Amino acid sequence: FGPKTVGALRATQSLLAMMNVVREALENIVPPLAGKALAEAGVAGLKRTLRLALLFSALTGGAAVLSLAAFGPWLLRRLYGGEMLEFDWLVVWYSLILPMALVNIVQGCAFRALERTRSIFLASLAAACFNILAIYPAGVVFGVAGIIAIAVSTELITLIALAFLGREL
């Protein structure tokens, strides 16, 4: 990887940082709502609250992906110059992490509300093990595309593991 590739990755991360507002909102708003719903209406109330939060997370993340797919290359050119345009695909592929990360936050809130944090640990462990084993070979063989693919896959593994472990909720 050269300096141009690293610069493109940093530029992409900067564009995606705008979603930190949504992430922070979810991390600060959903846990108290989940706790209140569980206390007032039990698991059924918790499920209702989390369904709405999951819908919001998925829709917000999906809208971000679509927006970045449509305007990401334009933003890269305006903010970082024309030399970054060869990496415009990075913005779209890297943004695929957003909806999954937002949904994972809500899933984590469900486990925390029920005091079943072991499931969060196991999902994170599975994703981390995959990442450790796959990131270097993917980077060597596929370059920056391999690294992005592993980052997206790692978030997907977390999402699937949390969904699997939460199927009894």
Image: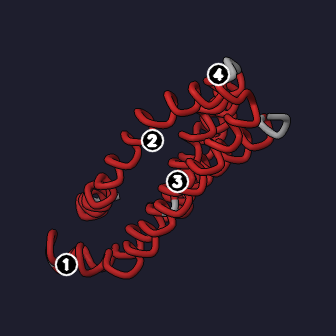
Q: Earlier in the sequence, mark 3 or mark 4?
A: 4
Which residue lies under the disc numbered 3? Answer: 57
Residue in the picture at 71% in, 40% down: 47
Q: Earlier in the sequence, mark 2 or mark 1?
A: 2
Residue in the picture at 80% in, 41% down: 164
**Residue 140 in sight from this viewpoint:** no
In the displayed structure image, the side of residue 85 where residue 61 appears, left or right: right
Distance in Å between CA atoms under marks 2 and 3: 8 Å
Q: Earlier in the sequence, mark 4 or mark 2?
A: 2
Distance in Å between CA atoms under marks 4 and 2: 19 Å
Q: Amino acid at mark 3?
A: Ser
Which residue lies under the disc numbered 4? Answer: 39
The outermost residue toward the right is: 168
Give the image location of residue 96, x and y in percent: 51, 62
Which residue lies under the disc numbered 1? Answer: 77
> In what element is the residue under mark 3?
helix
Residue in the picture at 15% in, 70% down: 79
Disc nearest the viewer among 3 and 4: 4
Distance in Å between CA atoms under marks 2 and 1: 31 Å
Name which quarter of the figure residue 69 lies in: bottom left
2 and 3 marks in contact (CB < 8 Å): yes
